[in-house]
């Protein structure tokens, strides 16, 4: 009798501890809470030396919904800033050291409206959380970053000149007569659009196919049957040249754009390794829809249906 009571007491105590832990982590197993974010360390690096605001970090980023539908993956180098509020993405970066990998859960509305200062995509609703997986590859002070950049630019100067020669030969061979823009992009309209032009803050939906100068494809939303939707003008969404090209288009327009590497993946190449450093790329882009953030509810419902049909 006493033995049974003892076992039962232990079981109740264990359950109480488990419930307390679940409450602290918001019901997300394996996550702990700190400074307004839920976090879970996946890999711990060799040193414990988190960055400070003002430092430059290089990291692999993956944004996904709570149902694990990924909507952004990329490798970025940028300067950290002081968190403006508890639970911001800046808090996540400041918690990590070089070599760490971690998963974070933050408020999606705060991320899009406070951090990116844009409207939430239609596939994320008010009150939703989102996952951010981060692999911290490198941390440098502002002075270290400046010195490294100067040394690297000297070393790669020859590579940049070779890319210019390859692009020049391609333009002559294909008899492309359009003049490049001030940034160096070649924009060739294939089909004119009759819809609205793209404006800052619009939720745009595009189809695109990316290929190298030799004609080999490296990415295609058409083959995946999954148009890409993003908020125009927000950071970390598309490469600079593609954003510039889309900003020149109207709904229904299709265009061919040739992007030198400084408008694409630059001196490092793509994070996946598919696009090498100093590589000019070609995109064929079709602007399917551009919806203002102040659009009426009918337009918003149309976007939501389209997002649901293309969500993985």
Image (cartoon, helix red, strand yellow):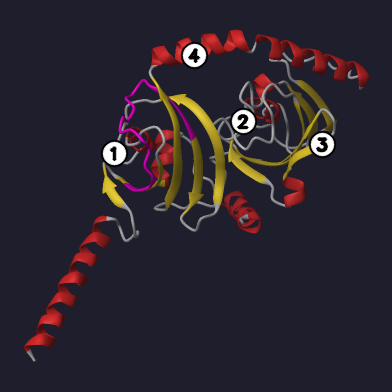
Element marked by disc 4 = helix
Residue at which label 3 appears: 216
In the displayed structure, does residue 289 sit left or right of residue 15? right
Q: Residue furthest bottom?
A: 1
Query: Could you tell me which residue is drawn at 41 percent across and 45 percent down?
Result: 109
Label 3: element kind: loop
Mark 1 or mark 3: name the one nearer the start of the chain: 1
Q: Is residue 253 visible?
A: yes
Q: Earlier in the sequence, mark 4 or mark 2?
A: 4
Q: Could you classify mark 3 by the number of other residues whose Cα lies within 10 Å: few (under 14), some (14-19), or many (20 or more)?
A: few
Q: Which residue is mark 4?
A: 148
Q: Residue at x 50, y 45 (%)?
A: 63
How far apart in space, not on screen, are marks 4 and 2 (Cα)?
37 Å
Q: Position of residue 152 (x, y in %)?
A: 56, 13
Identify the mark nearer the N-term, 1 or 4: 1
**Distance CA(mark 1)–CA(mark 4):** 32 Å
Rendered-image quadrant of the N terminus: bottom left
Q: From the image, state whether disc 1 or disc 3 is nearer to you.
A: 3
Mark 3 or 2 closer to N-term? 2
Q: Marks 1 and 3, how far apart in space? A: 46 Å
Boundaries of the magenta span = 38-59
Q: Nearer the viewer, mark 3 or mark 4?
A: 4
Q: Which residue is mark 2?
A: 199
- Give neighbour class at mark 1: few <14, some 14-19, many 20+ (Cα, 10 Å): few
Residue at image mark 1: 86
Could you tell me which residue is drawn at 27 percent across and 49 percent down?
Answer: 33
Numbered disc in front, either 3 or 2: 3
Residue 82 placement, left or right of 280? left
What is the number of the mark on residue 231? none
State which tag comes first along the sequence, 1 or 2: 1
Disc number lying in front (1 or 4):
4
Based on the picture, tell me whether residue 82 belongs to the magenta stretch: no
């Amino acid at each position: 009798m006493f033995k049974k009571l003892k076992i039962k007491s232990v079981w109740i105590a264990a359950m109480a501890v488990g419930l307390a832990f679940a409450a602290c982590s918001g019901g997300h197993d394996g996550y702990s809470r700190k400074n307004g974010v839920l976090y879970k360390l996946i890999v711990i690096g060799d040193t414990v030396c988190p960055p400070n605001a003002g430092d430059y970090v290089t990291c692999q980023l993956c944004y996904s919904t709570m149902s694990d539908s990924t909507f952004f993956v990329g490798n970025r180098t940028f300067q950290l800033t002081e968190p403006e509020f508890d639970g911001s993405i800046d808090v996540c970066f400041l918690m990590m050291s070089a070599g760490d990998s971690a998963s974070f859960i933050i408020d999606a509305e705060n991320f899009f409206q406070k951090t990116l200062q844009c409207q939430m995509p239609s596939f994320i609703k008010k009150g939703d959380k989102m996952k951010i997986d981060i692999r911290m590859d490198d941390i440098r002070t502002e002075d270290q970053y400046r010195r490294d950049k100067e040394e690297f630019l000297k070393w790669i100067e020859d590579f940049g000149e070779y890319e210019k020669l390859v692009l020049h030969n391609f333009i002559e061979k294909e008899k492309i007569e359009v003049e490049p823009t001030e940034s160096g992009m070649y924009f060739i309209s294939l089909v004119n659009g009759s819809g609205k032009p793209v404006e800052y803050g619009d939720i745009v939906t595009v189809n695109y196919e990316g290929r190298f100068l030799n004609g080999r494809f490296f990415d295609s939303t058409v083959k995946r049957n999954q148009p890409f939707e993003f908020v125009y003008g927000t950071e970390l969404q598309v490469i600079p040249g593609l954003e510039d090209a889309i900003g020149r288009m109207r709904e229904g327009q299709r265009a061919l754009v040739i992007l030198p590497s400084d408008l694409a993946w630059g001196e490092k190449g793509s994070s996946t390794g598919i696009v090498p450093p100093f590589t000019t790329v070609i995109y064929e882009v079709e602007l399917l829809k551009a919806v203002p953030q102040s659009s009426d509810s009918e337009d918003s419902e149309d976007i939501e249906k389209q997002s649901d049909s293309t969500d993985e």
